[in-house]
Every structure is written in structure tokens, then in C-alpha cells.
Amino acid sequence: MASSEALSRPSVGSRAAKRRGMMDGNFTIGRFGGVQVRLHWSLLAVFALIVWSLTDGVFPSQNPGLSDGTYLAMAVVSALVFLASILLHELGHSWVARREGIEVDSITLWLFGGVAQLKGRFTSPGGEFRVAVSGPLISIGLGVVFVLLALAGLPSAVDGVAAWLGYINLILAVFNLLPASPLDGGRVLHAALWRAKGDFAWATRVASEIGQAFGYLFIALGLVMFIFQGSFSGAWLAFIGWFLLQGARAEARYVATEQALGGLRVRDLMVRDPVTVNADATIGRIMDDVAWTHRFTSYPVLKGGRPVGLLAFASVAAVPRSDWDTQRVRDTMIPLDEVPLLTEDETAVDALAELSAPGANRGLVVDNGHLAGLLSITDLARALEVGRRPAQEPAERG
Ligand SMILES: [Zn+2]
């Protein structure tokens, strides 16, 4: 059984990611070397599948004559060490990324292996190459160690576990080195193309197309194996193909968006000095003073001059008229810890990732605890529209 993994694209604010993580079924198991490690529920399925296939097939045929209990114990130990091996592979990426000056948000282990969430951008092809190869190098190292253990003439049960772990880690390394973006090999290819032509966006487009071609190939091959041989590996291969296809497409989209937003930052797009409301004001007061004169969809809420939340006009409108004089803004607003917080310096691409999270379509721009502005997904969409138009005369850009 093969497993894949990928370095995910940068961005997403850690708070938004945490919120999404809980909804996506991830839970944190701890921190290793300063990197948060999370597990996805789908890992339980992988674990069960590995234990089942090892207990039922691999170990009885390769290490005959042992008891059923021994096979089960061997399988559980193998599955646990394999998951630890994937974790080490991801930590390899993360530690090298840190050395290259890239912040690592978290590592998530799931159905297809691991994903390291990196924040920030590679400044050189060399940096991207070093981060990409670090994971497979760790897998190769682990594979060699386990193969040597298997050759050391240990008792049959230990020998069987070591042999399988050696095999699976080497398979993991080879698979991840396929030049199929978003796999590690795809990153290596991207770095090589980037270095050759000095054009990041072009390199991403080409690497993404090759990644998509691998995706289609795996899906086709997997379906053929599944339909004509009834082989379960076929279904697995098709799944991995689908995952590659989605990942490679996302890469191409990301770069297209990044180009359209061309170096813009939050400060270039945000609404400065938005109309604010007081946390202690009643809803009736807001209706009289603010809502009828400025028909905005949302208002930053201040208390003692500091932002404490965001008031959506829709939720004000939903308050029954009889409660207008008793209900206050602070009871109706979205509290600050549920509002995406942006900084003026943040790139528009990163802000887009934060505001694309479910339920978060506008964020507060905060500077040293003070409100600097308001940015909505609509402001970003407008900038994207402008950026995607064919190049205009510089004079028209303003
Ligand atoms: Zn990797």
C-alpha cells in the first residue's frame, strides 16, 4: 500500500485554521520540536487497514509458523511505527523549512499520509528544493535502517516487522519523489523549472499540468485494476490520483489568484475609518443613528476605543422590534475571537485565504489593538476582477 503526502500551500491564519480544523475532524496530539501535530479521523481507517492486511496476508506468508496473536501484535507495532515514520518525514520538511525562514503552522496526518502547513513563501529555488527533498531523505534513511535490521538475523517476529517497515519507508520515499505536484518530487521539479527560467508562475503552471497528468493516469490505472482484477490497490491508486488532481489544480489556481492580486496588501484594499458602533448601545439606537443613514452590511464594534467585535446588519434586522430598547450591540455582535483579524501589512492573497473560510466573509484590520479598517471578501473579489482584465495602460491604473 502506498501513501502520499504533500506540503500544503502557505497561508491561512492559525486561528481560522484551528476553527476549520475542529470542523474537519482533526485533533491535536501535541507539539514536536515546536510544530503542532494533528491527526485526522481518516487515519483510524488507514491504521485498521494496515493492521488487517498485515495480520491476514503479509506476515503469515512471509514469516510462517507464528501464532495469530503474534501476527496481530506485529501488525499493530508495524502500523504504529509506520505512522511515526510519516510523522518524521513531515517533521523533516518542517525543520528544514524553519531553517529556510519559513514558519510552520502545523502537521496533519490523514488518509494519504501527512501535510505540513507552511506559512510564507520560498525566496529561492534552492530553498524549495531543500525543503522538498528533506522528507524523502528521512524516509530513505529510515528504510535503510529497517532493512539493515531485517538482515541482522533477529527473531522471526522482529525480523518480519523490520522488513515490512524497511520496504514501506522506501516505497514512501520513491512514491513521493514522483515528479507529480503536489508531491515532493513535484516540488523538486518546480524548483528546477524555476531555477532554469527564473519564472515562478510559469514553473508552477508547468508543474501543475504534469501533476494533473499523473492524477489522470493514476485514476485510469486504478480503475482498470479495480474493474478487471477486483484489486483493492486499484481503488487506492484511483483515490491517490484524485487527490493529486485536486492538489495540482489548487496550485495553479493559487498562482493565478496571486498574480491577479499582484503584490497588493490589505492596506491597499481595506475600507479606512469605517462607521463603527458602541458595544453598549441598544439595537434601537443603532437603528436610529446608524443603520438608516449608512446602509452597510457590517459595522466594527468598539468599547473604550478598542475593537471588540463585528455587528452584521442582518443580525440587527433579525431582532424583534419589541426588543430594540433592551437588547444591546454586545449581545448581538460576533465576538472578536470569531472574527478574522488582519494586519495592514498582510498580502491580499493571505487575506483572501482567511476570508474564504466558512462563515468569515469580512475581517477587521487591527493595528496594535486599534481598529485600522475593514476588509470584506467583496473588496478582494473586486480587486481580482480588475487584476484579471487584460493589461491596461499604466495611466489608467491610477
Ligand atoms: Zn514529503
Image: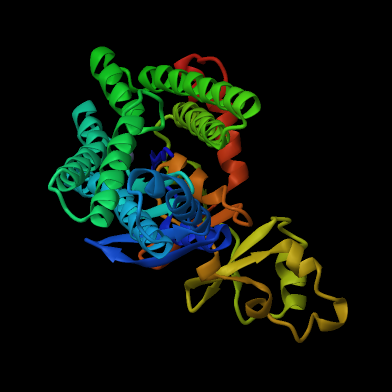
Q: Looking at the picture, does residue 134 appear above or below residue 17? A: above
Task: Judge by depth and name the residue closer to the eye, 333 or 149.
Answer: 149
Q: Is residue 165 above or below residue 283?
A: above
- Residue 300, given in percent of the width and then of the height, sits at 58, 64
Depth order, front residue of 388/21: 21
Instruction: Give coordinates of residue 313: x percent, y percent.
Output: 72, 62
Outermost residue toward the front?
65
**Which residue is pictured at 23% across the width and 50% down the height?**
159
118 horizontally vs 144: left or right: right
Please name the residue shown 54% across and 56% down the image: 363
- Whether residue 205 appears in this view of the structure is yes
Q: Is residue 268 above or below residue 45?
A: above
Image point 21% across, 43% down: which residue?
138
Q: Quadrant of residue 378?
A: top right
Query: In which quadrant will I find the N terminus?
Result: top left
| Residue 114 visible in the picture | no
Residue 129 is situated, as x and y percent measured from the top left of the image, at 23, 30
Who is closer to the viewer here, 133 or 66? 66
- Residue at the spot 41% in from the left edge and 16% down from the top edge: 206
Q: Quadrant of ligand 1?
A: top left
Q: How many numbered marks appear?
A: 0
Instruction: Give the camera-side residue of 368 and 48.
Output: 48
Please say which color scheme the image uses: rainbow
Relative to residue 329, is residue 384 drawn left or right?
Answer: left
Pick out the residue farthest to the bottom: 326
Q: Quadrant of residue 323?
A: bottom right
Q: Residue 289 at x, y = what percent?
A: 72, 69
